[in-house]
Image (cartoon, rainbow, N blue to C red):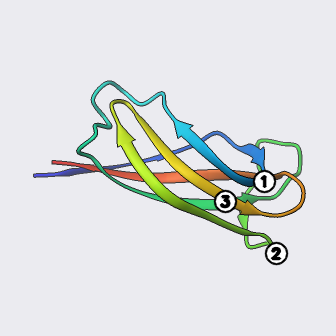
Amino acid sequence: MSTVTAYWSQPRTANGSFVYTIGGFPPGAVTPNSIVTAQISELTNSGTSNDVPFIGDAVMRVDNIAPAQDNVVMRVEIDWASPLLFEINLLVSNG
């Protein structure tokens, strides 16, 4: 039987194409054999912890995902001239 667990990244600001690593998972929660899906969202930029996802004019995408031991490495692209606030949500399946 497999398990599916949801995780999310801390909000960050960036733009352009870059490699992004999400770590800090419980030991063994992510392995090189995990199945990982990712979703990126632009966040409102209110300056509070209540920022919520919305659909803005920028194109944001996760191009590649490579699960590793206790972290996930991905290539991300945010097609905007200046840095935008975003978060990435992950679903990790093991089993």
Say which label, 3 or 2, has the lower sequence index: 2
Q: In this view, does 62 lie to the left or right of 15?
A: left
Where residue 1 sits: x, y (%)?
Answer: 10, 52
In percent of the image, x 64 and y 39: which residue is there? 10
What is the quadrant of residue 19 in the picture? top right
- Image quadrant of residue 71? top left
Mark 1 lies on a secondary structure that is loop
Question: Residue 39 vs residue 78: left or right?
Answer: left
| Residue at x 37%, y 27% (from the top left corner) | 26
User: Measuring 74% from the left and 73% from the top, which residue is drawn there?
Assistant: 55
Q: Earlier in the sequence, mark 1 or mark 2?
A: 1
Q: Any mark on residue 15, and which? A: 1
Residue wearing tag 3 = 77
Residue bearing the label numbered 2: 57
| Disc 2 crowd, CA 10 A, few/some/many (<14, 14-19, 20+) | few
* Whether residue 93 is situated above or below residue 29 in the rendered picture: below
